[in-house]
């Protein structure tokens, strides 16, 4: 049963095209293999978000819905489809947060598709904690984060952020503190970005029958 104070669960993702996604994994997996892993991770996070049963699930897409780049990606029924739009990552994330919190009027959990350890249980707990906190953050070992949850736009959390560096989560938490936000921090997880990260894939994760 969905929590009475549900959030919208927004998954941010690029179309899993060979040579366009997970490029740092190409030396280990090849372009096709890296794209196949990206597709598997996207399918996984959408499944986990749906299983969390914490609110409606949205896939915020780049390129936008309907682009041929998505032709070979199966998106589960019931998942809303929106476009990320233009701008750098921070601008696109800030726009999605503003749209959900200010225009739709719901708390938002914004997450990527690079973290197989971001399970339904973690997402569900983040949604529960967001009921009694101003923000939630699930950090990852490389210094970024896999999920951020907010109840209001907070654009300063995304502006001029040094994305893809080891300071993203720390800088985000510092900015949250400066805003006086009450923050819940989730468990430290692992993104799959570099060949060494492949050791953190769950057993059997690439088995098509899983």
Image (cartoon, grey):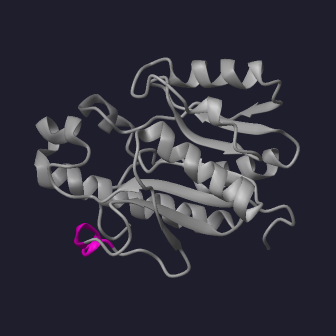
Residue under the image location 83 percent in, 30 percent down:
182
Residue under the image location 63 percent in, 29 percent down:
156
Q: Which of the pair 61/195 is nearer the observer?
A: 61
In the rendered image, the vertical position of residue 1 relative to residue 180, given as above or below: below
Residue 117 appears in the rendering: no
Q: Which of the pair 152/33 is nearer the observer?
A: 152
**Is 26 positioned to the left or the right of 2 in the image?**
left
Task: Tell me if residue 58 is in the magenta stretch.
Answer: no
Task: For the C terminus, give its image quadrant.
Answer: bottom left
Give residue 164's quadrant in the image: top left
Image: magenta residue range: 68-73
In the rendered image, the vertical position of residue 184 relative to residue 121, given as above or below: above
Residue under the image location 15 percent in, 44 percent down:
29
Task: For the N terminus, give its image quadrant.
Answer: bottom right
In the rendered image, the vertical position of residue 30 relative to residue 72, given as above or below: above
In the rendered image, the vertical position of residue 111 relative to residue 63, given as above or below: above
Residue under the image location 32 percent in, 60 percent down:
63
x and y, in percent, of residue 150 in the image: 72, 44
**Is 118 positioned to the left or the right of 86 in the image?**
right
């Amino acid at each position: 049963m969905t929590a009475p104070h549900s959030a919208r669960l927004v998954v941010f993702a690029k179309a899993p095209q060979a040579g366009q996604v997970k490029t740092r994994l190409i030396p280990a997996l090849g372009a096709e293999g890296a794209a196949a892993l990206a597709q598997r991770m996207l399918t996984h996070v959408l499944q986990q978000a749906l299983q969390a049963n914490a609110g409606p699930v949205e896939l915020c897409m780049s390129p936008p819905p309907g682009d041929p780049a998505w032709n070979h990606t199966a998106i589960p029924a019931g998942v809303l489809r929106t476009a990320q739009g233009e701008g750098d990552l921070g601008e696109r994330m800030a726009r999605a947060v503003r749209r959900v919190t200010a225009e739709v009027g719901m708390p938002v959990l914004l997450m990527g598709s690079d973290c197989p350890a971001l399970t339904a249980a973690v997402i569900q707990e983040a949604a529960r904690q967001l009921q009694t906190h101003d923000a939630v953050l699930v950090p990852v070992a490389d210094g970024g984060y896999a999920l951020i949850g907010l109840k209001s736009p907070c654009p300063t959390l995304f502006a001029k952020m040094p994305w893809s560096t080891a300071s993203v989560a720390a800088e985000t938490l510092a900015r949250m503190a400066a805003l006086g936000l009450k923050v819940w921090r989730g468990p430290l997880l692992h993104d799959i970005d570099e060949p060494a990260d492949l050791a953190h894939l769950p057993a059997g994760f690439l088995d098509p029958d899983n």
